[in-house]
Image (cartoon, helix red, strand yellow):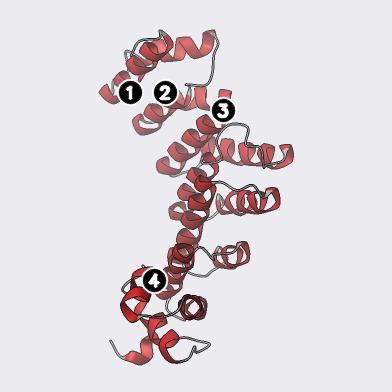
């Protein structure tokens, strides 16, 4: 492919421009930095320049590069989730989920991540599925999210779990609800979905108690799908304190 196809816009200079071009085939900018002997600031400049590249694969790789360097900002992510290319939006959501997984002591930052993920639940399935996973990474009662944000996250996930046309998105939403210890009735309702969602629902019932939960798990022991049955057996064993 001609070099002009990988010319950054706006252009960087010197080694930074060369490194930005390399991003299309290698997102591991830390490795490239070592190979080329570039300074950290030059590598960061290359990645920032690549965020504005006209090729979506380069923009996506730039997000990975900035994440690797530890300089990916909320502003970068908020711009990227509005990108015209699904591959860029998905990568931005994946990067956000990674940041959530590693945690933050900054409440304002955590809430921006959460809002970004909530918004992305309304995106195409390839993006929405990852956004649901990312919300689940906050875990139960996350200390850096306010009650309104948690309420909005749970409501959006319940809507996805109950009505999304893509089963993978419903499955991801159910898993996230279980991780957040939220949406009990929605998780129970998911026990009537297709097999992949039912399997996830059985697992997502772990934090919940009650006769209806016990009945749902007991019914799953006779599910027509063997993986659902296995998940139910594991749940019963866990609830009985068996290893």
Q: Nearer the viewer, residue 220 or 205?
A: 205
Residues at discs 1 and 3 in contact (Cβ within 8 Å):
no
- Residue located beneath label 4 in the image: 29
What is the spatial separation of the Cα atoms under label 3 and label 2, in whole angstroms?
A: 13 Å
Which callout, 2 or 1, points at the residue further toward the start of the chain?
A: 2
In this picture, residue 221 sits left or right of residue 155: left
SS of the residue under disc 1: helix
- Residue at 64% across / 49% down in the picture? 110
- Residue at 67% across / 42% down in the picture? 144
SS of the residue under disc 3: loop
What is the spatial separation of the Cα atoms under label 4 and label 3, in whole angstroms?
A: 37 Å
Does the image show residue 24?
A: no
> Where residue 202 is drawn, which disc sits there?
2
Q: Does 124 appear above or below 49?
A: above
Q: Nearer the viewer, residue 61 or 71?
A: 71
> Where residue 18 is drawn, which disc sits there?
none
Between label 4 and label 1, give the one nearer the viewer.
Answer: 4
* Residue 127: percent from left, percent from top: 47, 55
What is the spatial separation of the Cα atoms under label 2 and label 4, in whole angstroms?
A: 40 Å
- Residue located beneath label 3 in the image: 181
SS of the residue under disc 2: helix
Quarter the C terminus occupies: top left
Can you tell which quarter of the image residue 192 is in? top left
What is the spatial separation of the Cα atoms under label 1 and label 3, in whole angstroms?
A: 20 Å
- Residue located beneath label 1 in the image: 228
* Residue 40: percent from left, percent from top: 47, 75
Between label 2 and label 4, give the one nearer the viewer.
Answer: 4
Does the image show residue 26?
A: yes
């Amino acid at each position: 492919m001609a070099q002009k196809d990988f010319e950054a816009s706006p252009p960087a200079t010197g080694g930074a421009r060369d490194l930005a071009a390399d991003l299309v085939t290698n997102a591991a900018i830390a490795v490239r930095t070592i190979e080329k002997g570039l300074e950290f600031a030059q590598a960061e400049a290359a990645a920032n320049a690549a965020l504005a590249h006209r090729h979506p694969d380069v923009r996506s790789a730039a997000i990975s590069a900035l994440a690797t360097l530890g300089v990916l900002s909320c502003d970068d992510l908020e711009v990227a989730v509005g990108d015209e290319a699904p591959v860029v939006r998905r990568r931005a959501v994946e990067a956000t989920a990674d940041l959530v997984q590693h945690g933050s002591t900054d409440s304002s930052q955590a809430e921006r991540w959460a809002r970004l993920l909530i918004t992305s639940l309304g995106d195409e399935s390839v993006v929405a599925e990852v956004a649901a996973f990312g919300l689940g990474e906050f875990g139960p009662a996350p200390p850096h999210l306010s009650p309104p944000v948690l309420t909005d996250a749970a409501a959006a996930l319940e809507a996805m779990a109950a009505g999304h046309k893509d089963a993978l998105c419903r499955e991801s939403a159910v898993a996230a609800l279980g991780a957040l210890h939220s949406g009990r009735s929605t998780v129970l309702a998911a026990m009537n979905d297709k097999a992949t969602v039912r399997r996830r629902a059985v697992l997502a019932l772990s934090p919940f108690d009650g006769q209806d939960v016990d009945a749902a798990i007991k019914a799953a022991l006779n599910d027509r799908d063997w993986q659902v049955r296995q998940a139910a057996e594991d749940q019963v064993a866990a609830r009985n304190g068996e290893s």
